[in-house]
Amino acid sequence: MTPDESALSIAEDVRHGRRSAVEVLESYLAVIDATEKEIHAFNLVTRDRALATAQDVDAKISRGIEPGPLAGVPIAYKDNLCTWGVETTCSSRMLEGWKPPYNATVVDRMSAAGAVMIGKTNLDEFAMGSSTENSAFGPTRNPVDVSRVPGGSSGGSAAAVAAGFAPLALGSDTGGSIRQPAALCGVVGVKPTYGLVSRFGLIAFASSFDQIGPFANNVADAAVALEVLAGQDIADSTCIPSPEPTLLAEINRGVEGLRIGIVRELLDGSDEDVALRVHQAAEALVAAGAFVDEVSVPAVEYGLTAYYLIAPAEASSNLARYDGVRYGLRRRGSNVEEMNMLSRRHGFGDEVIARIMLGTFALSAGYYDAYYGKAQKIRSLIRRDFDIVYANHDLLLSPTSPSVAFKFGERSDPMSMYRSDVCTIPSNLVGDASMSVPFGNGSHNMPVGVQIMAPALGEALMFRAAAVLELAEPVEEVHD
Ligand code: GLN
């Protein structure tokens, strides 16, 4: 086994009896035993349950039952995805010890495809953050350089794949939480079109943005994972009633004749080492027959501001349910109000409290039009600007993150942390598809991710471009 072994090859081996699902699982558990202490990708490793699931997969195969496209593939779930009877914490004291009475739809779909849950991964509390430093249970470290953050909020999932703890992981992406950690850890991360993947059982942060998507070592594995995840679900009314996408079969069709735009505004604000890789990625796409030019999406400049009003506004409403009564932590008070207040004050960390306050303020009478209302108008402007460029472009290109992975504690001022999301937020604001593909290293020899964006339901084309970049990955290194 190699740390970047592909999920597809594991499933092939298991299906044909070359290895058992139990053997595969044990090889990953051995890697976890060796290095998880240093990385802290997991809130929980579900060892016994994983063993029972892997045995089930092996039993199915020996009885000649179709085991599914991900037979015996270990998978890690971000700890904001509900798993039946398995602690789901959102890396918050508020939900510590809470065992959901149901599975998220994505968890059921992965199980039906033969995947084996290996554990629940660390995140910034309630998915609010870009470094996992906001986890109530301590940060995750970047496997490429443990003195640096893995990104966030799905830092545990990205680190799990990068460290070889699992060939696949799931995360959620509200403003970049799959793509940014994927870029910082050097793995593939996909934010599907809003509505392509059911969010039933994803603990809500900002419901008009949240999407679930895969992390993988390579583009083909991410494609298969998304094929398994995608599709309508009657339990999530925001699911698009569209046919499930065909991704893997199309992946090697190349980019000849495609029109791809580099988003100037997102390139301009990025570090030089990162911008250089985006230019090299563009050259690789040109060499493969695409037409690449620079485009302008002017309203993206206001994306960050709009996101940090709308997302906290939605969060303030979604998190109102943690009242000390229905879930998790309860602190006693002399009356109900005091019990609510004490439970919330002790259950939530500083960033979550700051966002709830910001969101409540943005929605309050007298300020609603000035803040929330204006932010929604910016959202419409960004949609309009994207529509204009997509009228004569198939895909867009940008950095995923304006910089490579930073050191712990380096971004203690919230604005400098929020700026980590400047390139990823626009596609959340409009609900389009986007993904990050590793493309060489930048300063400090840390991985750089290139972001490919596509219009809604443009995943098939997006994956084709990703496959071209994967093959063209530059070898020479940038030195500081
Ligand atoms: N980093 C962004 C935030 O803090 C995005 C988080 C996410 O996508 N869940 O809101």
Image (cartoon, helix red, strand yellow):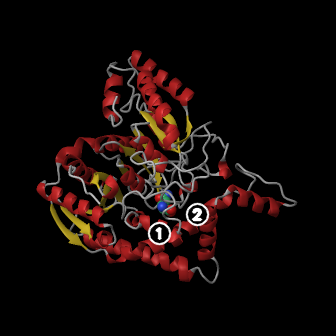
Relative to 25, is 332 on the left or the right?
right
**Residue at 38% across, 32% down:** 70
Callout 1: few (<14), some (14-19), or many (20+) C-alpha neighbours within 10 Å? few
Q: Residue furthest top?
A: 62
Relative to 101, is 417 on the left or the right?
left
Vertical position of residue 36 compared to residue 313: above or below: above
Nearest the camera: 224 or 217? Answer: 217
At which x and y percent is residue 222? Answer: 34, 44
Camera sees residue 242: no
Nearest the camera: 157 or 290? Answer: 157
Q: Which residue is mark 2?
A: 315
**Residue at 57% across, 52% down:** 203
Relative to 202, is 248 on the left or the right?
left
**Residue at 39% across, 26% down:** 67
Q: Which residue is mark 1?
A: 416
Question: Dot 2: what SS?
Answer: helix
Camera sees residue 20: yes
Question: Dot 1: what SS?
Answer: helix
Residue type at mark 1 is Ser
Q: The N terminus is located in which quarter?
A: top left
Asked if the residue at tag 1 contacts the one at tag 2, i.e. Cβ–Cβ closer than 8 Å, the answer is: no
